[in-house]
Amino acid sequence: MTQRFQYLNEQKNCLRLTHQLLDQADVDGLLRCLNRHLQHSPLPFPCSILLDNPRQGPMLYQLQQDNVSPLDDEMLLQNGPLRIVEATQSTLHLSQDEYQQRYPALFQQTTEQPFNDALIIPILNHRRLLGYCELRRADAGRFDADDEAYAELVGESLGVALEHLQARLSLGLEQNQLCEERDDFHVLVNVTNAVITERSVESLVEKIAHEIHCYFGINAISVCLPDTDPSLLNLYNAFFTQPGKAQRSHKRIAAEHSICLSVLESGEIQLCELDEQDPRAHNETQLFGFWPAATQQLCLIPIKFAGQVLGVLKLAQADSGCFKGSRLQLLAQIAERTAIAVDNARAYQEINRLKDNLVRENHYLSEQVESLSHQQFDEIIGASRSIKDVLKQVEIVARTDCSVLLLGETGTGKEVFARAIHRLSPRSSKRMIKMNCAAMPAGLMESDLFGHEKGAFTGASKERMGRFEMAHHSSLFLDEVGDMPLELQPKLLRVLQEQEFERVGGNRLINVDVRLIAATNRDLQKMVVDKEFRSDLFYRLNVFPIRLPALSERRDDIPHLAKFFVSRACQHMGRNIDSIPAPVLRRLQELDWPGNIRELQNVIERAVLLSSGHALQLPPELEEDDSAEREFLKVNSRPVLTATTRNHDEDDEYQRIVSVLQETNGIVAGPRGAAHKLGLKRTTLLSRMKRLGIDKDAVLE
Ligand SMILES: Nc1ncnc2c1ncn2[C@@H]1O[C@H](COP(=O)(O)OP(=O)(O)OP(=O)(O)O)[C@@H](O)[C@H]1O
C-alpha cells in the first residue's frame, strides 16, 4: 500500500467516524462509537474520554465491560495530564512508568489492567480545549509517529462531534427550560385568572387547589386563615382522593401548637419531614380527617400581602422533590397570587358585612324615624294625675341602667314612654334599637336578637350582627315581650344577667352593655302561673314595672290629646280646622276607647278627613252603638216621610213620639227625656224623628 493510499484511507476512515460520532445523542454514545471504530482501525486499543466542562469541572468517561462509568473526582482529574495538554495543546506520549510517576493517584484510580504505552490526544475545537482522549496499549509495542498522526485525526473528529453534541444538548436544555418557564407561566396565569374574580374564600381555595393538584400532582392542599377568635384558625381543605376530584372541608382548629401558627407568626416557609409515626403527622391526620398515603413532607408557605401575613398555604406530599428549587419558588409565587385574592375576599366580606349592617341600621332607623315623625319627637301629651305619676317614675328610672317593664293595654303609649326613658338616659347619644317579639317569626328571633355566624344554619351565607350587638352602649326595646318563645327566654335571661352571649352557630362570647326596656299588654304574672313565661325572666324584667293607665282611666287628658291630634292631622292633610265643638269633646270623653290613644288618634284623623267646615265633626260611627249608627245611616239615606207618604205603622209611631215629646216638653235626652220614656237611645230617637219629619219645636206650638 502506497503511503498516499494509506493516508487517503485513514482520512476516509476518520470521515466515516466523524459521521458516526455526529449521530450520537450523548457522551456515552460517543465513547461506545469511538471504541467500536478503533477496534477496526490501525489503533485497536481501548480509549477513554475526558471532558473539561468549565461549569461542572472535568469528567472522565471510561468503558468498562461495555459499561460507561463516569468519574468526576475533580481533584484527581485536575492533577492528571489535563493541564499540560491544555497548555501545550499537543499529544502527550507516556509509558506506564512515566504515567505512574507523574500522575500516581490517577494511575491508581484508572488502571484496572496494566498497560505499556499511553497516548493522550487533545480534543480541540477552534483552538479551545474540550478535553482529551486517551489510548492505552497493553501489548509490548509502543505508539509511533503514524499512530500519533492517526490518533490526532480521531481527536479532531471527536472535537467536531463534541461541539455538535454540546450545541444540541444546550439547545435541548434551553428548549426544556423554555417549556418549563412557559408551563410555570401558564399555571400562574391560571391561578391569577381563577382567583381574580373569586370573592368567597371557599371557592378561592377550591380553584387554587385544583391548579396546584393538576400542575404539581399534590393531593392535599389547605389554606389556613386566622379566625376572629385569636385562639382559632380556619382551615379550608381540598383533598384529592381520586385524581381531579376534590373532597372539600372547612374546620376551625385550635391555633396553639399548630404548625400553621408558627408560619403565620414568622412569615417564613417551613418544610417538615413527617412519617406516620411522627406525632405531628398524627395531629395533622386528626385535623384533616384524612392523611394522603405515604405523605412525607409538609410544606407551609406564608400567604403575604403588603408585608402582612394573611394566611398559610399548606401542602402535603409524598414526593419531596416538589418542595425544592424552582418548584418551591413557583409555589411561593402561587401563594403571592393567592394573597391578593385572599385580601380581596376579606375586603369583600368586610364591605358586605358593613353594607349589611348599614342596611339593617337604616332599616331600624327608618322604622324609628317613621314612628318619631308620628309622635312629634316623642311629645307626651297628658296632664292627668295618673300620667303625671307615670312621668315621675320615668324620670327616676331613666338615669339608671335598670331594666324597665312597661305594662298597659294596647295603644296606651308603651313605646312612646320607652323612647322617653331612652331619651332621658345617659345612653341617649346612641339610637335605641327596637324589636317586636310578636311580629318576628319564632324561628328567626334568636338570630335576629343575637346574630349568627356564617353557615350557622341553611341560608346563613354570611355572618350577621344581632340587635343586642347593635344596642351596645344603648337601649334595646323589646316590645310584646310576652310573645318571646319559651325556649329563647333562658338566653335572654343570661344576657340580662351576664351581659354576654354567643351568636347562633358561634362559640365566641360577645360582651355587650345594653339597657333593656321591655313592654307587654299581656298579664305576665298569669303567664308565669300558666307556665307560659319563665318566672326567673319575669322577676328579672319586673325590677321596675311602670303601668300605663288606659285612656278610660284618664278621660281628663282626652281633650288635650284630641286637640293635639287634630292639629297634627290638619298639618299632614293640609286642612284648616280651628275648633272642636264642646259636644264633640264631651262625646269623645264619653266613649270607652278599648284601643286607647291609638284608637283616639285614628278616630280624630278620620274626623278631620270627613269634616267639611272649620269645626271638627265626628264621623257617624261615633254614635252610641253600632245599631244606632246603622239606624242613623238608614234613616238619613231615606227621604223624610210626610202625612201622605207614611204608612199605617209609621203613622202610629209618629203619633206616639209626638205625644211623648209634648209630655216631656220637647226634652229628648236625660232621665226625664222622651228617649228614656220611649225606651230608645237618644240618637235612635233623633234619627226616627228626622225620618218621620217630626220637628220638636213644632210639636210644642
Ligand atoms: N301620651 C301620648 N301623647 C301623644 N301621643 C301618644 C301618647 N301615648 C301614645 N301616643 C300615640 O299613640 C299611639 C300608640 O302608642 P304606642 O305605640 O306607644 O302604644 P303601645 O302601648 O306601645 O301600643 P301596643 O301595645 O299596641 O304596641 C302612637 O301613635 C303614639 O304616638
Image (spheres, helix red, strand yellow):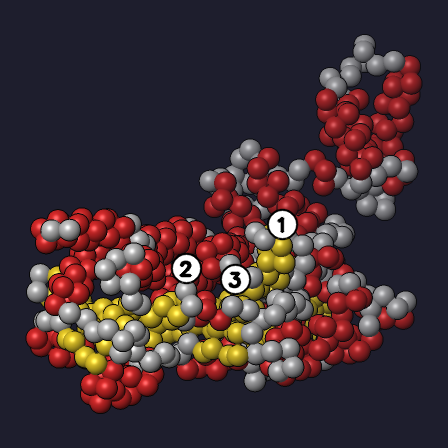
- The amino acid pointed to by label 3 is Ile
Nearer the observer: mark 2 or 1; the answer is: 2
**Labelled disc at residue 601:** 1
Coordinates of residue 118 in the picture (x, y in percent):
23, 75
Residue nearer the viewer, 367 or 290: 290
- The amino acid pointed to by label 1 is Gln
* Residue occupied by mark 3: 218
- The amino acid pointed to by label 2 is Ala
Coordinates of residue 80 in the picture (x, y in percent):
22, 82
Is residue 343 visible from the viewing direction of this image? Answer: no
Nearer the observer: mark 3 or 2; the answer is: 3
SS class, disc 3: loop
Q: Which of marks 3 and 2 is nearer the N terminus?
A: 3
* Alpha carbons under labels 1 and 3: distance apart: 73 Å
* Residue occupied by mark 2: 341
Residue 684 located left or right of residue 197: right
Coordinates of residue 350 in the picture (x, y in percent):
45, 62
Q: For the residue with label 1, is its CB less than 8 Å from the closest atom of ligand 1?
A: yes
SS class, disc 1: helix
Residue nearer the viewer, 100 or 252: 100
